[in-house]
Each structure stands twice: as structure tokens, then as C-alpha cells.
Amino acid sequence: MAYRLSGKVAIVTGASAGIGRATARALACEGADVVVADVAEQGGHETADLIKSAGGSAIFVRTDVSNSDDVQAMIRRATEEFGGVDLAFNNAGIEGTQAAAADFSEKDWNRVLSVNLTGVWLCMKYEIPEMLKRGGGAIVNCSSVAGLVGFPGIAPYVASKHGVVGLTKATALDYATTGLRINAICPGVIDTEMIHRFTHEDPNAEVQMADMAPVQRMGRPEEIADAVVWLLSDASSFVTGQAIAADGGFVTR
Ligand code: NAD
């Protein structure tokens, strides 16, 4: 079997759980050396151990993507351990609290924007120079269907995810001639801890969330991982600056 990403070094942020963990594992299955970056240490070590016990290559680096020093240290560790950076899935994100837009505290607003939007920019800021040293690469930023349409009750999240789409488009244009492709993935409702927290584990609320998609089910983290692997591989070599929904038809409705 041919591995699509042999010899490539891939960073995955928010890789201690959910979509990030599934994608880190999928990238390793394709032969990439994977940097598992997350604030959550136990889950991060678990993801790296899962990859290594399946015969893959991974290190865990504790990283808060909203902290510039952490992001820079994570990139340094990637280059020391694996020699450079080729691919990145900037996936770390938080759902924040729920309220009408005017009722959020400034602290809650700033926290969601600093992780979900500034965190993606900070990661790209330090990933891109390393990728350019190696003649290019590929980046996927994690947005959401909430980056394509509005939802009530989660204005900071919706704003941050729309921001990720705009940031992705602008940055893809900045580097279009350099061999670096940058796209966003926009997942629909995916069965992860984030959704369980969001619905407060209420089974009725979870069914309602699942029914929002025309396919009438939640997605699995592995279904997002497959799309991200495609976007990070040469199989998508003419795709850049796109925000691709993987959402069971949600935004088509
Ligand atoms: P999750 O909560 O299961 O995993 C998110 C991971 O990000 C966790 O491991 C967490 O520790 C990590 N993280 C949080 N803040 C961080 C920080 N400051 N620095 C580094 N890591 C941090 O959530 P998930 O569902 O896997 O979500 C992954 C991404 O997908 C998020 O950006 C989320 O907004 C997006 N998304 C999720 C869904 C969904 O339905 N689950 C839908 C659309 C988009």
C-alpha cells in the first residue's frame, strides 16, 4: 500500500480528543510524523501512545494555541524532533458559553476569539515560515457550519468561525504562488465531547442536534479526518482558499 504522507511532518492542534485525535491518527496511518498539540496533557499523551502502538510516529507537545510562546515552542519542538513542518491542521477550539449577543461578558467573548481565531492565526504565523523553508506545504483550519451560517445563542463562536473562513481565504491568497495551500474545513454536528457539553448530555437535545442535518445523524470524527487528510495530501493539489462543509448536507438545506 502507498502511504500518501510518508516523509511529511504534520501538526494537529486540539489533538487530545475528538476531531483532532481522529485526524492525528489518520495522518499517522498515511505515514506522517505527527505533532500532537493540546492543552490537555493526559489526552495528548494518550493520542501519541495510540499512534505509536499502531506503528506510527508521534510526539505530544503541551500547547495553548492562544499563547504565542507556547505556539513558538511547539514549532521549535517539531523542527528539533522531525526536522521541519509540512502540514498542519489548526483544529483546537472551544464552544464558549451560551447567551444572547449583548449578554456575553467581555471575558467570555475574548476567550472564545483568542482560542478559535487568534489561535489559528498564531499557529499559521509560525507554521508558514517553516513550511516555506521546505518549498511549501498544506494547512487546514477548523471552522464550522457556524462559520458559514448564523446560529442564535453563540455569537462569539459564530464570529470566530466566520473569522477562520476569512482568515483562511486571505492567507491562501497571500501564499498562492509559494507552493503552500490553505483551506478550511467546516464540520456539521460531530459526535464529540464538545457536543455532549453543549447539549449538557441531554439525549433529546442530542437527537435534535443530529436531526438538524438532512442525513439525520451526527457525523463521526473520522469522517472529518478523512476530509482533512484529503485536503492535506497532493490529491487536492488544485484546491486552495476553500471553506469545505462536511456536514451531512446541513448548509445545503
Ligand atoms: P473537543 O472538545 O472534543 O476537542 C477539542 C480539543 O481542543 C480538546 O482536546 C481541547 O483540550 C483542545 N483545546 C481547547 N482549547 C485549547 C487551546 N487553547 N489550546 C490547545 N488545545 C485546546 O471538540 P471537537 O468537537 O473535537 O472540536 C474540534 C474542532 O472542531 C473545534 O475547533 C470545534 O470548534 C470544531 N467543530 C466541532 C464540531 C462538533 O460538532 N463537534 C462542529 C463544527 C466544528
Image (tube, rainbow, N blue to C red):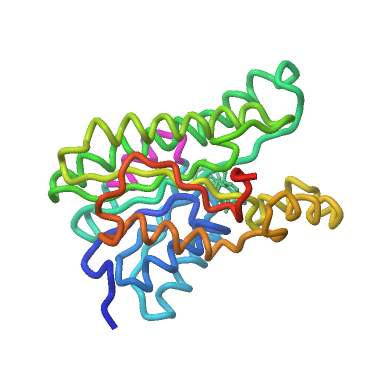
Please provide percent x and percent y for residue 55: 37, 80
Q: Quick one: quadrant of the C terminus?
A: top right
Q: Residue at x 73, y 55 (%)?
A: 210
Please provide percent x and percent y for residue 173: 26, 32
Q: Residue at x 66, y 50 (%)?
A: 194
Q: Is residue 99 above or below residue 103?
A: below
71 left or right, relative to 47:
left
Instruction: Name the quadrant containing residue 112.
Output: top right
Residue stretch in magenta: 65-75
Outermost residue toward the bottom in this view: 1
User: Is-magenta flag for residue 66?
Assistant: yes
From the viewer's side, name the closer residue of 94 and 211: 211
Q: Main secondary structure of the magenta part?
A: helix
Please provide percent x and percent y for residue 33: 30, 65
223 left or right, relative to 211:
left
Q: Quick one: quadrant of the N terminus?
A: bottom left
177 left or right, relative to 219:
left
